[in-house]
Image: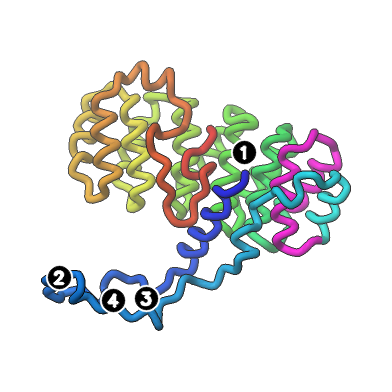
Amino acid sequence: MTGCHDDDEFEKHLEEDPDPQLDPERSPGLHTDIEALEDIEVSREDVTIGEATPEELAASDTEPVEDDAVASLLSDIEHGAKTDRRRAALELKDRATTDKIVAALARAATTDDDSDVRQFAVEALTAHGGERAAAVAVELLDDPDPWVRAEAVVTLDNVDREAHEDDIEDAVHDDHHAVRRNAAISLFKLRGEAMADLLLEQSRDDSERVREWAAHMLGGVDEDRARERLRELTDDPATVVRQTAERSLEADPGRFRRQFGGALENDARLLPGEDRLNRMPDL
C-alpha cells in the first residue's frame, strides 16, 4: 500500500486544482526561436505546485498504523483527523472481517465529509465483501466525488457484478471518465461481444482514457466494424489510444475474451487523479 497512493493523491490534487502557471501556452519559450540551451531563461518565482501538504500526500502510507490494534483503528476512523481516518480505512482493509469493521467502514464510506476517506473506505469494504458492501457501493454511485463513484463500481464488480448489472450499466453514462470506463470494463466481462455497440460509442469519447479502454476491449469483438474502427483509432490524436488500437488489431478476439482480466498489459501510466486501482481496476 505504501508509495503508490502518495503519488496518486498528489496527481488528484493537480487535476482538481490545476496550476495555471503550468499551461503550455504560458511557456516562456513558446513562439521563440532558441538556438542553444544557454539561450533559455526561465524564472521560477511565480511557479507553484499546489497546496497539498506533506501530511496529506502521506495519508495513504499505512506503515505508521500497521501494528495498531483494531480498536485503535476503529477509534481513528470515527474520531481521528482526516489523515488518521484515511490511514485507518486503508489499514482495516487487511484486518480479519468483523461486524464492527464492516459497520465502521460502511459509516465512513457514506458519511465522512472527506472524499478520500469515503473512497478508501469503500475500497477497504470491498475486501470484506457481502451484501453490506454492495449496498454501500450502490449508494455511493450518487456520491458527489467521481473517484468515490469509480471505486463504487469496482466494489460492485468484485462483490457481485451479475446481481448489480443494471446499477453498473447506469454508471456507463456518468459524467466522469473513470466511472464510465470502470463500468464498461465490468460489463464487458459479463457480456463480451454484446458490448460492441457501447464500445464503438466509447471509442469516440472525449476522454482519451475511455477511448483507450474501448480500443483495448474492441480487440475482443470479432466483427468487421470493430476492426474498421480500430484501424481508424490508429490515427487517434492520443498516442496511448493509437498504440492500444494497434495491439488490439493483432489480438485473437476469442482468446482475448477468455483471458480478459480488466487490465492493460505493459502500461502503468497514471493520469492526474487516478490511483492504480482505478487506472487498472482489479475487475
Q: Position of residue 249 (x, y in %)?
A: 24, 28
Q: Is residue 107 magenta?
A: yes
Left or right: 160 as drawn, with respect to 75 = left
Q: Residues within 10 Å of mark 2 (few under 14, many from 20)?
A: few
Q: CA distance from mark 3 to mark 2?
A: 24 Å
Q: Residue at x 31, y 36 (%)?
A: 215
Q: Position of residue 26 (x, y in %)?
A: 28, 76
Q: Dot 3 lies on which element?
A: helix
Label 2 sits on residue: 36
Q: Residue at x 49, y 26 (%)?
A: 190
Q: Amino acid at mark 4?
A: Arg
- Front label number (1 vs 2): 2
Q: Is residue 230 visible?
A: yes
Q: Indicate which disc, 2 or 4, sits on the residue closer to the N terminus.
A: 4
Quadrant hosting residue 67: top right
Q: Is residue 266 magenta?
A: no
Q: Amino acid at mark 2?
A: Ala
Q: Is residue 149 visible?
A: no
Q: CA distance from mark 1 to mark 4?
A: 41 Å
Which circle marks residue 155 in the picture?
1
Label 3 sits on residue: 21
Label 4 sits on residue: 26
Q: Amino acid at mark 1?
A: Thr
